[in-house]
Amino acid sequence: MQTSDKSADKSAAAWAGRPERSNTLAIRFIVWVALRLGRRAARLFLYPICLYFLLFAGEARTASKQYLYKVLGRKARVSDGFRHIHTFASTILDRVFLLNGRFDMFDVQVHLDAAARSLLEQRRGCILLGAHLGSFEIMRAYADEIKGPPASVVMYEENARKLNSVLKAINPDLAQQVIALGKVDSMLKVEQALQRGEFIGILADRGLEHGAASVSCDFLGAAAKFPSGPLRMAYMLKSPVLLMVGVYRGGNRYDLYFEELMDMSGSELPRNESIRQAQQRYVARIEHHCRNAPYNWFNFYDFWKS
């Protein structure tokens, strides 16, 4: 792993800066179809939608082929590309039900390592690092289901604004659970939430803030940049850090994994070494889950800047 002082991944920044494909009216229509007609009927709409993106979203299709070649070890077939997009679309549709408290519709198998189980039993606040891998919403739904600590999501201000517009269309009550970084009181809100024993979720595979520090890691056989900000924040707040991955297995089945990356509250290592070790484990475990569930990776841009 090699520290880089260059600006965040330009491809990721460009991806984040694109105009949103759907507006609130379209989202409300999808929500209406899903909640009125049911999940089985709504899933029928996914096939023409996925076919459209497979045919006309050239950049996303190219990025999908690039990733699938690395993770599968062979050239991706058309069926692989369709399955990749369909898996993504399925998790997006399931958001509607998960964010409306319909956890009962899904068969979720939860896998906790010893450290994660201990944190849950002690009801300690912790930072959950996720990725654009599978479903992040399944974590929030799981916290509600077990009547565990509340789960908030931390993201940069512009992305928080976009997510809030989506949440207001799906379930307005959840918009208050998004903490926007970049404000005067952002870190104070995160610290207070941790002190209350809450989950703080961060997607840590994209560096979407211009000028953000990043590290170069070997990922699926090639160098890729990952933001170091989330782990720096965890070290500053002396928080335990877990990896959270919600892998979609098809149908209504999910596997939800909680794994310890590092307990920053008890680390005796220097800051940079603590962050380096936690970052290495994060990337290694993300790669493990990608190989275990190859169609669950949802970064549809040139992640490696080839």
Image (cartoon, rainbow, N blue to C red):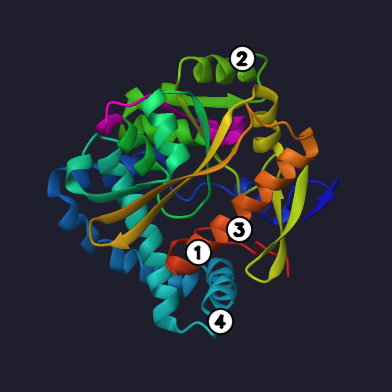
Mark-to-mark CA distance, 4 and 1: 12 Å
Location of mark 3 (residue): 284
The three-letter amino acid code for the residue at tag 1 is: Cys
Q: What range of the chain is rendered magenta? A: 144-161
The label number, if any, that marks residue 290 in the structure image: 1
The three-letter amino acid code for the residue at tag 4 is: Gly
Mark-to-mark CA distance, 2 and 3: 31 Å
Mark-to-mark CA distance, 1 and 2: 34 Å
Mark 4 lies on a secondary structure that is loop
Mark 2 lies on a secondary structure that is helix
The label number, if any, that marks residue 188 in the structure image: 2
> Does residue 207 show up?
no
Q: Quadrant of residue 223?
A: bottom right
Name the front one of labels 3 and 1.
Answer: 3
* Image marks 3 and 1: residues in contact by CB distance under 8 Å: no
Q: Please tell me how crowded label 1 is: few (under 14), some (14-19), or many (20+) other residues with Cα within 10 Å.
A: many
> Reading the chain from its start, which is encountered first: label 4 or label 1?
4
Location of mark 4 (residue): 73
Report x, y in % for residue 145. 25, 33
